[in-house]
Amino acid sequence: MNTRRLNHIFRPDGRTLIVAMDHTGIFGPGKGLEKPGETIKKIVAGGADAIMTSFGIARHFCSELAPVGLVLRADGAPTIIGPDEPAPIWFSIEEALRLGADALCISAYPGSLDKELPSMEGLVSVTRDAHNWDL
């Protein structure tokens, strides 16, 4: 486990405040997310330890994200795929590391009749690849 990456997310006392900005762009920006760079600056100024966001936001606003930990959403939205398809993984672990990701976020749906198997397969695949890179 990479303590350096975890220290970008967690405070010495083990606590963290992670702000989720990972649904921008799916259906257009939600209220308050029309100007992501300004929103990120406000989140950082407010004392967040990390921001969970999409690859595109992380790529375009890397300087604004630099002061906090970065958690990248690795998968796509379940609303845009079929019921028996895994959520697509939009980028490689290497690309996430190039952006400075400290961790990844991926959804899984245990107990769901139509999404359990494909989502768990996606979770296992991403977890295996991430662990190979100590992410």
Image (tube, rainbow, N blue to C red):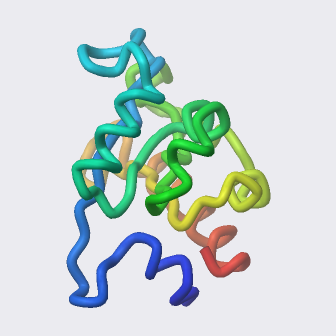
Side of 63 where 120 appears, left or right: left
**Left-right relation of 110 to 101:** left
Q: Residue visible at 30% across and 44% down? A: 43
Asked if 65 appears above or below 68 in the picture, the reply is above
Q: Nearer the viewer, residue 68 or 112?
A: 68
**103 versus 110 height, above or below:** below
The correct choice, above or below, for 79 with respect to 110 in the image is above
Residue 4 position, x and y percent, is 55, 84
Quarter holding the C terminus? bottom right
Q: Is residue 34 above or below residue 82?
A: above
Of residues 41 and 23, the one drawn nearer to the viewer in this rendering: 41
**Horizontal and vertical percent position of residue 79:** 39, 21
Which of 119/93 is in front?
93
Q: Quadrant of residue 131?
A: bottom right
From the top left corner, tell me how far across and down residue 78 is, in percent.
Answer: 41, 30
Q: Residue at x 30, y 38 (%)?
A: 42
Which residue appears farthest toward the top when viewing the image? 28
Q: Quadrant of the N terminus?
A: bottom right
Res. 130 image quadrant: bottom right
Q: Please name the residue shown 60% across and 44% down the image.
A: 63
